[in-house]
Image: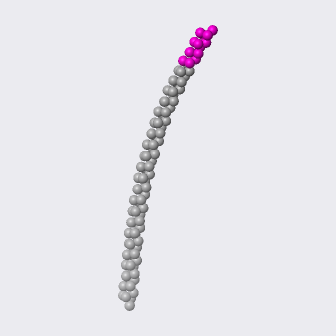
Amino acid sequence: SVLIGLQAEKEKLLRTVKDQEAEIASLRQAAQLHQTTLQQERERHQREMAALQSQLQEKLSREQELQLEMDKLRRELEEKRAELLHAQSALNSKET
């Protein structure tokens, strides 16, 4: 009777161990899946960040080009104004 009780206890413990091993395996699988998902998200974020940095660099380059063009146009406008003032001054001199 003691032997039967010990045998039953042993079987119960073996079932508990098997259940715990199955739970551990399941948790490992879930952790691995979670880690894979995190890695994929990290890679996606890195790609998005690289794309945004590229867009920002393109925008900055374009803004620099536009600023140079605006500076050039301002200089040309000032030159034309100076020419106009000179021409008006010459006209005024001839009229008087």
* Camera-side residue of 29 and 13: 29
Residue 3, image x, y percentages: 36, 87
Q: Residue at x 61, y 10 (%)?
A: 95
* Camera-side residue of 15 and 83: 83
- Is residue 49 inside the magenta stretch? no
| Secondary structure character of the magenta stretch overall | helix
Q: In the image, which residues are magenta?
A: 83-96
Q: Residue at x 42, y 53 (%)?
A: 44
Would residue 79 be found to the left or right of residue 22 on screen?
Answer: right
Would residue 23 be found to the left or right of residue 80 on screen?
Answer: left
| Residue ranking furthest to the front | 95
8 is higher (above) or lower (below) than 87: below
* Camera-side residue of 93 and 5: 93
- In which quadrant of the rendered image does the N terminus lie? bottom left
Q: Residue at x 47, y 33 (%)?
A: 65
10 is higher (above) or lower (below) than 36: below
5 is higher (above) or lower (below) than 88: below
| Residue ranking furthest to the bottom | 1
Residue 58, image x, y percentages: 45, 39
Residue 32, image x, y percentages: 39, 62
- In which quadrant of the rendered image does the C terminus lie? top right
